[in-house]
Image: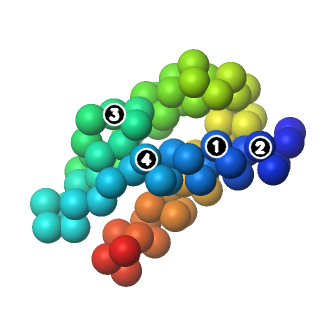
Amino acid sequence: MDKKFLHKVLDQIVRETEMDYEKERAYTPFYSFIPYYSLSSYRSPFTKHCNNVYGLNIQEIEYVWEEYRRIIMDKIENNG
């Protein structure tokens, strides 16, 4: 697993995610929008996106998902 590449993928997905703090939702490259309270439910579209766009395997997707979720939850808790 090339963590340098995975962090580039992670950075790209985070950059492409737009937060709407007023409506409490995130607009993502893998799903039109996700309400904050249901972020964990959107793992399947995230998995498909990472596999189709970046060619990641399941272990790499797991790593990127956990990091992505941590970053987005931090943004939600701190309003950016």
**Extreme residue in the bottom direction:** 78
- The Cα atoms of the two marked residues, 4 and 3, are separated by 11 Å
User: Which mark sits nearer the N-terminus, 4 or 3?
Assistant: 4
- Mark number, residue 16: 4
Which-is-in-front pick, marks 4 and 3? 4
Q: Regarding mark 1 in the picture, which secondary structure is present there?
A: helix
Identity of the residue drawn at 51% across and 27% down: 49
- Mark number, residue 31: 3
Identity of the residue drawn at 56% across and 47% down: 12
Identity of the residue drawn at 68% across and 48% down: 8
Q: Amino acid at mark 2?
A: Phe
Which-is-in-front pick, marks 2 and 3? 2
User: Which mark sits nearer the N-terminus, 4 or 2?
Assistant: 2
- The Cα atoms of the two marked residues, 4 and 2, are separated by 17 Å
- The Cα atoms of the two marked residues, 2 and 3, are separated by 22 Å
Q: Amino acid at mark 4?
A: Glu
Residue 41 placement (x, y as % from top left): 37, 40
Residue 45 placement (x, y as % from top left): 43, 28
Residue occupied by mark 1: 9
Q: Amino acid at mark 1?
A: Val
